[in-house]
Amino acid sequence: MSERNVERKGMRCTLFSTMHRTIPEPARMIDVDKLEFCKYCDEPLIIIEDAMFTGHFNKVARVTKKLGMLVRAAGVPVVILTALYKPTADMKGIECLYIRKVDERGEWTKYYRWTWEQFHNAVLQIHAIHEQHCKGKHGSKEGKDHPEARVVAA
């Protein structure tokens, strides 16, 4: 079974993480939860640390923030987010998200409550903004001519 199929079925192999924990101090590792990127030039657009919302706003994300700041220092205008998601009662969707981002000064903003539709539109808008200076091949039906990208960019 491919890793993609395993992820879709809700199971995940944690063998690498488990084995890495056997390496003594000072070795440390985190997983980068989500990395949204341009399919044409592979530039990172959004780095996301996500977690299910448990009623507490305590997701630390220090290392994710540092990673994002390094990417920004390299001249890539990446968006750095923490996304706490609240699943629907049937666990088949997302009721809402609590989003915070790292601002231009490198500080976390407060959390804002978003719907999935707001998040969806924000991701498309970030892609549309990036497209204006992308060095990759845009123009296919998935690129700038796609109707959703035009609506968000307007």
Image (cartoon, rainbow, N blue to C red):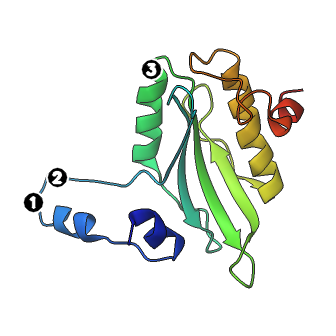
When the figure is inspected, residue 12 is found, relative to residue 147, above or below; the finding is below
Look at 41% across and 37% down and name the residue there.
67
Image quadrant where residue 104 sits:
top right
Residue kind at label 3, given as amino acid type? Ala
Location of the N terminus (image quadrant) = bottom left
Residue kind at label 1, given as amino acid type? Pro
The answer to which of 151 and 1 lies nearer the viewer is: 1
Q: Is residue 28 left or right of residue 56?
A: left
Name the mark on residue 27.
2
The alpha-carbon separation of the residues under discs 2 and 3 comes to 25 Å
Q: Is residue 128 left or right of residue 68?
A: right
Residue kind at label 2, given as amino acid type? Ala
Name the mark on residue 12.
none
Look at 59% across and 41% down and name the residue there.
108
The alpha-carbon separation of the residues under discs 2 and 1 comes to 6 Å
Callout 1: helix, strand or loop?
Answer: loop
Q: Is residue 90 left or right of residue 64?
A: right
> Could you tell me if the residues under marks 2 and 1 are in contact, i.e. CB atoms within 8 Å?
yes
The alpha-carbon separation of the residues under discs 1 and 3 comes to 31 Å
Res 114 visible:
no
* Residue at far left of view: 24
Label 3 Cα neighbours within 10 Å, binned few <14 / some 14-19 / many ≥20: few
Q: Which residue is mark 1?
A: 24
Callout 3: helix, strand or loop?
Answer: helix
Callout 2: helix, strand or loop?
Answer: loop
Q: Which residue is mark 3?
A: 73
